[in-house]
Image (tube, rainbow, N blue to C red):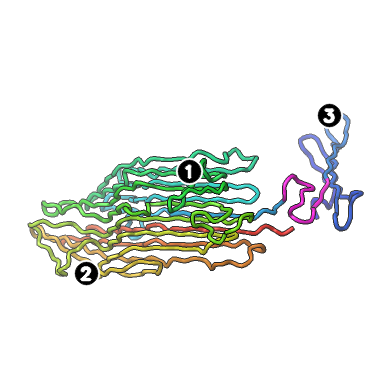
């Protein structure tokens, strides 16, 4: 096979020409069971300026020993270690406005309007060496208007580490933190002005290290510190404040409607925070992880977790009225928005390796959604949800004119999934376990007209972000 055959090669570099010969020969120690070979390369300059031609030779002994634990040709065992990989994340949720799928909404003077939720992620890979990565991103806004653009928040704390001798990265770096910095922004168009209000508080923290313990206190979802002395990583975002998108309509016949809210997102108040992720390799059961790993002296397992929560999400509000308005609203039920999500919590957990526990995913919330004449209340769990919302239509009178706002929408949440467990033998192919907790996704459309003439059409969309935990294990090859 090339480049051993043909074994002679001629190369011209500048004004000089070189002839290289490659020779593969048996050593005196060669046997069928241990085929030790000589690989010899001889290069000679055959033309060109300079001193007299003379060859340069390089020779290497080539030997592939039996078994992965042999150290006869290298200082360490070869690819004999077990392979571990763990990752966990709360994918970036967002709430945004559009018009027929396009970002631009001329009636609001918007070319792009988006609220970004905080996001966290961690990953750890270990075999002969280990590498780790953790990041946490604060919430933020992007509001691009006809005359100005604002981008605020979305500040990242990120840290990486590995113990590869050839790397410049530290093995146990200091944790990295980032404080939130953001303020509200407004832009306007022919119908009205839209205001995006991000969280003005919060802190992102990321931590990784090769030696979990007092120096690298990676914390799991329960707040417990990993102390196994093996690779770990954690990321967390805390102290989220309320976020919102509001619209202030233009005056109608000399008197304007009140500002109304398209979306309000309130922070969590319970034990589940706005975002946290953790992963670690463990040599034995610790803090409820790798519960079947009761004996020491094994390669252990890797565990990964992530969670996200919020107290409330209200989508699809309508303007309040005043005493001078004639309100066409005949349902007899007070309208509180198209969708109201309370107590939203999600978590995902995955493990792989010797003594790994079963994967788990959870999701819970109470959802009240408009059905056309009132509210339907549903308990959201691990099963899916897919519904078309009822229509809400309301007229606002002012003198001879009437402004009518009609609202529709959809609401979905795919089912929580986990891969089959326990997995078969992991020596031939890697075993992978993944838990996926899909986000609540909603789209609320607004159609607004004055005396039957359309004046504005737009939609508010919400994707609360998927939560993932995935782990991979491949057993070390046998001797």
Circle 1 sits in a helix, a strand or a loop, which is it? strand
Circle 2 sits in a helix, a strand or a loop, which is it? loop
| Residue neighbourhood size for the residue with mark 2, other residues' Cα within 10 Å, grouped as few (<14), some (14–19), many (≥20) | some
| Residue neighbourhood size for the residue with mark 3, other residues' Cα within 10 Å, grouped as few (<14), some (14–19), many (≥20) | few
In the displayed structure, would residue 228 be above or below residue 391?
above
Quadrant in which residue 388 is drawn: bottom left
Mark seen at residue 190: none
**Labels in figure, total:** 3
In the displayed structure, would residue 98 be above or below residue 374?
above
Pointer 3 or 1: first along the chain = 3
Mark seen at residue 158: 1
| Residue neighbourhood size for the residue with mark 1, other residues' Cα within 10 Å, grouped as few (<14), some (14–19), many (≥20) | many
Please state the horizontal and vertical placement of residue 411, each as a whole percent of the image. Answer: 33, 65
Mark seen at residue 374: 2
> Looking at this rendering, what residue extends furthest in the front direction?
295
Look at the image and give the residue range highlighted in magenta: 61-77
* Residue found at x 55% / y 49%: 228
- Distance from the alpha carbon under mark 3 to that under mark 1: 55 Å
């Amino acid at each position: 096979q090339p480049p051993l055959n043909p074994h002679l090669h001629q190369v011209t570099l500048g004004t000089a020409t070189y002839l290289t010969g490659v020779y593969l020969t048996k050593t005196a120690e060669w046997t069928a069971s241990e085929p030790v070979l000589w690989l010899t390369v001889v290069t000679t300059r055959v033309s060109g300026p300079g001193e007299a031609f003379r060859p340069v030779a390089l020779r290497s002994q080539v030997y592939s020993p039996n078994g992965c634990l042999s150290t006869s040709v290298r200082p360490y065992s070869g690819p004999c270690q077990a392979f571990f990989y763990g990752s966990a994340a709360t994918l970036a949720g967002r709430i945004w406005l559009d018009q027929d799928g396009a970002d631009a909404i001329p009636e609001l003077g918007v070319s792009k309007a988006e609220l970004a939720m905080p996001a966290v992620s961690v990953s750890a890979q270990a075999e002969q060496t280990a590498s780790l990565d953790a990041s946490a991103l604060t919430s933020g806004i992007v509001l691009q208007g006809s005359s100005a653009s604002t981008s605020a928040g979305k500040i990242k704390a990120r840290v990486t580490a590995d113990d590869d001798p050839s790397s410049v990265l530290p093995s146990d770096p200091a944790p990295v933190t980032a404080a939130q910095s953001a303020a509200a922004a407004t832009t306007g168009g022919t119908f009205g002005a839209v205001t995006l209000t991000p969280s003005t508080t919060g802190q992102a923290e990321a931590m990784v290290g090769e030696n979990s313990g007092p120096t690298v206190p990676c914390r799991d979802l329960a707040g417990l510190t990993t102390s196994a002395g093996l690779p770990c990583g954690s990321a967390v975002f805390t102290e989220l404040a309320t976020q919102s998108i509001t619209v202030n309509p233009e005056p109608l016949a000399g008197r304007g409607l009140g500002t109304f809210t398209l979306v309000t997102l309130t922070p969590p108040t319970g034990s589940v925070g706005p975002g946290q992720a953790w992963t670690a390799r463990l040599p034995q059961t610790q803090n409820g992880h790798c519960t079947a790993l009761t004996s020491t002296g094994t390669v252990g397992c890797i565990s990964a977790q992530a969670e996200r929560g919020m107290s409330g999400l209200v989508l699809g509000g309508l303007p309040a009225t005043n005493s001078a308005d004639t309100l066409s609203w005949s349902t007899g039920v007070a309208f509180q928005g198209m969708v109201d999500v309370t107590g939203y919590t999600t978590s995902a957990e995955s493990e792989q390796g010797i003594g790994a526990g079963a994967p788990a995913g959870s999701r819970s919330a109470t959802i009240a959604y408009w059905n056309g004449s009132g509210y339907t209340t549903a308990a959201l769990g691990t099963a899916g949800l897919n519904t078309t919302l009822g229509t809400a239509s309301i007229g606002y009178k002012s003198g001879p004119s009437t402004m009518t706002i009609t609202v529709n929408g959809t609401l979905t949440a795919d089912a929580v999934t986990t891969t089959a467990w326990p997995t078969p033998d992991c020596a031939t192919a890697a075993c992978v376990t993944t838990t996926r907790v899909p986000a609540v996704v909603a789209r609320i459309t607004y159609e607004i007209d004055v005396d039957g003439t359309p004046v504005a059409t737009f939609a508010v969309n919400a994707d609360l972000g998927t939560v993932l935990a995935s782990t991979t294990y491949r057993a070390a090859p046998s001797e």
